[in-house]
């Protein structure tokens, strides 16, 4: 497989880039007014482009000291499996390592899309079951 020649920038994706990538990976449609506010409240983000066109993104939300949540790691399907997602994760984890409190631990959470758990396990993430139960609710 040919190596992808991309640029990774330490910046939040634009609202339109976010929407395009979100929808390209099958996460449904996205309200851009809501995502604009969500992106603005994020701690850190990376955007991956080729010739200015977005092909990947990832961001971190949380308190920036103890709790970090990796969110919206998405790569256009035609570029998946070519190292783009790994580069995004390396940037996100490096940011957390630098920002976490020197004398403490950092809790890093994420939700993996169906079929993607093996990808995140390569970065040390694991299912906490049965010691912990991941829970969520969605208000719509």
Image: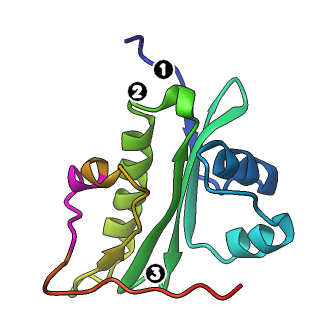
**Tag 1: Cα neighbours inside 10 Å, few (<14), some, or many (≥20)?**
few
**Tag 3: Cα neighbours inside 10 Å, few (<14), some, or many (≥20)?**
some
Foreground mark, 3 or 2, reads 2
Q: Dots 1 and 2: beta carbons under 8 Å?
A: yes
Mark 1, secondary structure of its residue: loop
Residue 22 percent across, percent down from the top left: 65, 52
Which SS type dominates the magenta stretch? loop
How many numbered marks are there?
A: 3
- Gap between marks 1 and 3 measured at Cα: 31 Å
Q: What stretch is highlighted in magenta?
A: 120-127
Residue 62 percent across, percent down from the top left: 49, 81
Residue 70 percent across, percent down from the top left: 45, 66
Residue 68: give its label: none
Residue 5 percent across, percent down from the top left: 51, 20
Please identify the quadrant where the C terminus is shown. bottom right
Q: With respect to residue 31, does 77 lie above or below?
A: above
User: Between residues 126 and 6, which one lies in front from this camera angle?
Assistant: 126
Q: Dots 3 and 2: beta carbons under 8 Å?
A: no
Foreground mark, 1 or 2, reads 2
| Marks 3 and 2, the one that precedes in the sequence | 3
Residue under numbered circle 1: 4
- Gap between marks 1 and 2 measured at Cα: 7 Å
Residue under numbered circle 3: 64
Residue shown at 61%/49% (left/top)?
A: 26
Residue under numbered circle 2: 82
The answer to which image quadrant residue 125 occupies is bottom left
The answer to which image quadrant residue 114 occupies is bottom left
| Marks 1 and 3, the one that precedes in the sequence | 1
């Amino acid at each position: 497989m040919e190596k992808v020649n991309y640029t990774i920038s330490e910046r939040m994706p634009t609202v339109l880039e976010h929407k395009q990538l979100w929808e390209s990976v099958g996460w449904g449609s996205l309200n851009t007014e809501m995502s604009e506010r969500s992106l603005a409240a994020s701690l850190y983000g990376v955007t991956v482009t080729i010739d200015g066109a977005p092909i990947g993104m990832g961001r971190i939300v949380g308190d920036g000291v103890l709790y970090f949540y990796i969110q919206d790691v998405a790569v256009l399907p035609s570029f998946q499996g070519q190292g783009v997602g790994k580069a995004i994760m390396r940037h996100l984890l490096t940011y957390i390592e630098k920002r976490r409190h020197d004398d403490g631990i950092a809790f890093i959470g994420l939700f993996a899309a169906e079929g993607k758990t093996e990808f995140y396990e390569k970065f040390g993430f694991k299912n906490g079951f049965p010691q912990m139960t991941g829970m969520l609710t969605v208000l719509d």
